[in-house]
Structures are given as structure tokens and as C-alpha cells.
Image (cartoon, rainbow, N blue to C red):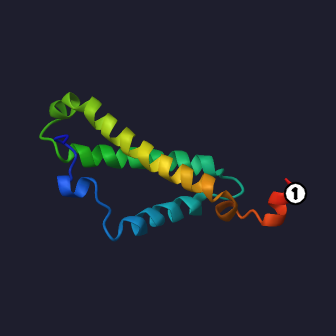
Amino acid sequence: MIQGIYMSNTQENQVDEKFYERADAHIALANGHVNAQIHPGLASNSLMFAASRFNAWVTAAGFKSGEDMKKEKKEVLDFFTNQYRLMLEENFDNYAENYDHFMGVSKEMAEKA
């Protein structure tokens, strides 16, 4: 376990009952920024930046000094990168398998394509 990541071993790999509710709230906030002038990619970039800044803060809260943090930079980056990759793969596969449902494609439109 990386010293600075502020969660117990039992919390690390568990999804609590509010996990998806919190995730959906963040998604709704990002969706609220998307409009005719703001492309979803711009909202996505802001959301990723916010997550990275928050995760840096969560990590820092578990260390006694910046020097201690620096010593574990690679492990921290690997941890968060691997977690993101697993989550993205799961959601990517879900969207690919259920594309028509998520993207609102009707059977008639799919047959014409």
C-alpha cells in the first residue's frame, strides 16, 4: 500500500453504497457544462483535471512532508493510472456492448446504416 494514499486497505478495493451516487453527481455536474458552445471533450478535460487535483490532495493528506510524497511519486501515479484504466476499460466495454441503448440509436436507424 502506498503510504500517502489516504484510505485503508479495506476501502481500497471496495465500492460503498454511495459510490455510484457520487459518480453520477459528478457526471451530472459535467453534463451541466455541456451546451452548444462547450463541447463534451472540454467538460471531460476539466473533469479529469479536477480528479487529478483532488487525488493529489488526497494523496498529500497521507504524507508527513512533500519530500516523502516525492519519494513515492511513481507508485502513486501507477496506482491512480491503473485504477483509471480499469474503470475506463469497464465503461468503454459497457458502452461498446450497449451502444444503441446509450447513444439512443433506434433499430430502424441501425438497420439503415
Camera-nearest residue between 28 and 97: 97
Question: Looking at the image, can residue 48 be seen?
Answer: yes
Up the image or down, 79 lies above or below 31; here it is above
**Left or right relative to 72: residue 91:** right
The answer to which of 51 and 96 lies nearer the viewer is 96
Say which quarter of the image contains residue 23.
Answer: bottom left
Which residue is farthest left? 64
Q: Position of residue 55 (x, y in %)?
A: 32, 47
Q: Which residue is mark 1?
A: 112
Residue drawn 32% across the image and 62% down it: 15
Q: Which residue is pictured at 20% across the width and 34% down the height?
A: 69
Q: Is residue 8 visible?
A: no
Q: Quadrant of the N terminus?
A: top left
Q: Decide if residue 68 is on the left or right side of residue 55.
A: left
Instruction: Reply above or below: 108 against 44.
Output: below
- Seen at 35% across and 70% down, the residue is 18
Name the quadrant containing residue 22.
bottom left
Image check: 4 left or right of 31?
Answer: left
Q: Position of residue 2 (x, y in %)?
A: 20, 40
> What SS does tag 1 mark?
helix
Q: Where residue 8 sits: x, y (%)?
A: 17, 54
Q: Sort mark 1 into few (<14), some (14-19) or many (20+) by Cα contacts within 10 Å.
A: few
Q: Position of residue 67 (x, y in %)?
A: 16, 30
Whether 59 is drawn above or below 95: the answer is above
Q: Amino acid at mark 1?
A: Lys
Question: Disc count in the image?
Answer: 1
| Residue at image coords 72%, 56% | 36
